[in-house]
Amino acid sequence: MHASFATATATIAGTATGPAAAATPDFAAIKARQKAAWASGDYAVVGTTLQIVGESLCEAADLRAGQRVLDVAAGNGNATLAAARRWCHVTSTDYVPALLELGRERAAAERLHGIEFLEADAEALPFDDGSFDAVLSTFGCMFAPNPPRVAAEMLRACRAGGTIAMANWTPEGFIGQLFKTVGRHVPPPAGVSSPALWGARATIENLFGAQALRIACETRQFAFRYRSPEHMLEIFRGYYGPVLKAFAALQEEGQQALAQELVGLMKRFDRGGGDGLVIPSDYLEVVVTRR
């Protein structure tokens, strides 16, 4: 991305391994830049391939017909649609209106009803306490720059005895390593931790444990499937906002170096055996029962 968007991509791709450093991040500025990054490209080209994770997460959450469900940082609506298919009353939220519109279009195409699409910040949800039976997030809340605030809002919106369910990329898995790789080329701002830390059980226990009756965490895998490493890079570079912006932030030599390193990473994780690219990427499936 051009220089003004550098911290957005760096934040999304952050490599820090712990909570804040000495500097206090400007969360408002970081979120504004993140929003621009996610609004660029066409996330749905990548996002729709992850639909199976939304279905699996709704099963893990044991959603029931008629429940009030909130999808936070919903993107183009994978968990939203999965919950609606289970006859839930769903509120789908994101801070990028264009992504909500994509979810709305998908819902209309499938003739799914009972969904409200609402622009909202994961760190300041516009709902009364205990408004929902279940609060979901698939690869969404993990990118917010202030994790304690996001967790507090998810807990606040969920009723006592309700469920918070998340799918978060792990630090060690492919996407976690992709974040780390991009972060080496476009460093994150001081004091902002890697989003992949949401994929560590210790982080989940720290964020939710005080208000949880139970926390269940299981490592799952999603397999990215593309024609080749070069094809995957083409798609991510062209449509996945954070990667698109990272390349735009670099000069030609830097772009070539990042491309070479990403292709190498894809080849290391590839389990396709030469018959197309197949990259299993670990994520943490989280189900919290609220106290």
Image (cartoon, helix red, strand yellow):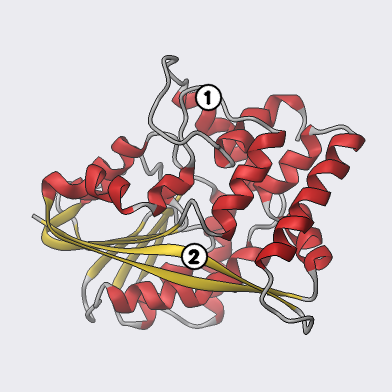
228 and 145: which is toward the camera: 228
Image quarter in which the C terminus is found: bottom left
Q: Is residue 126 shown to the viewer in this render?
A: no
- Circle 2 crowding by C-alpha within 10 Å: few under 14, some 14–19, many from 20: many
Q: Who is closer to the viewer here, 174 or 63?
A: 174
Please state which of residues 215 and 60 is positioned toward the viewer in this rendering: 215
Q: Quadrant of the N terminus?
A: top right
Question: How far from the left and from the top, in percent, is residue 130?
Answer: 14, 53
Q: Of label 1 and label 2, which has the lower sequence position?
A: 1
Say which mark, if any, is on residue 282. 2
The spot of residue 166 in percent (x, y) is 35, 60
Type of amino acid at the residue the image marks with label 2: Asp
Q: Residue at x 65, y 64 (%)?
A: 46
**What residue is shown at x 64% (from left), y 30% (from top)?**
187
Q: Position of residue 29 (x, y in %)?
A: 53, 24
Residue at (57% x, 37% y) in the render: 34
Q: Amino acid at mark 1?
A: Ala
Side of 70 relative to 258 (left or right): left
**Do we see residue 98 in this rendering?**
yes
Q: Residue lying farthest right?
A: 252
Is residue 3 positioned above or below 55 on the image? above
Mark 1 packing: few (<14 Cα in 10 Å), some, or many (20+)?
few
- Looking at the image, residue 32 sits to the left or right of residue 24; the answer is right
- As helix, strand or loop, the secondary structure at mark 2 comes to strand
Residue 29: mark: 1
Q: Is residue 105 above or below residue 210?
A: below
> What percent of the width, then of the height, locates residue 241?
67, 48
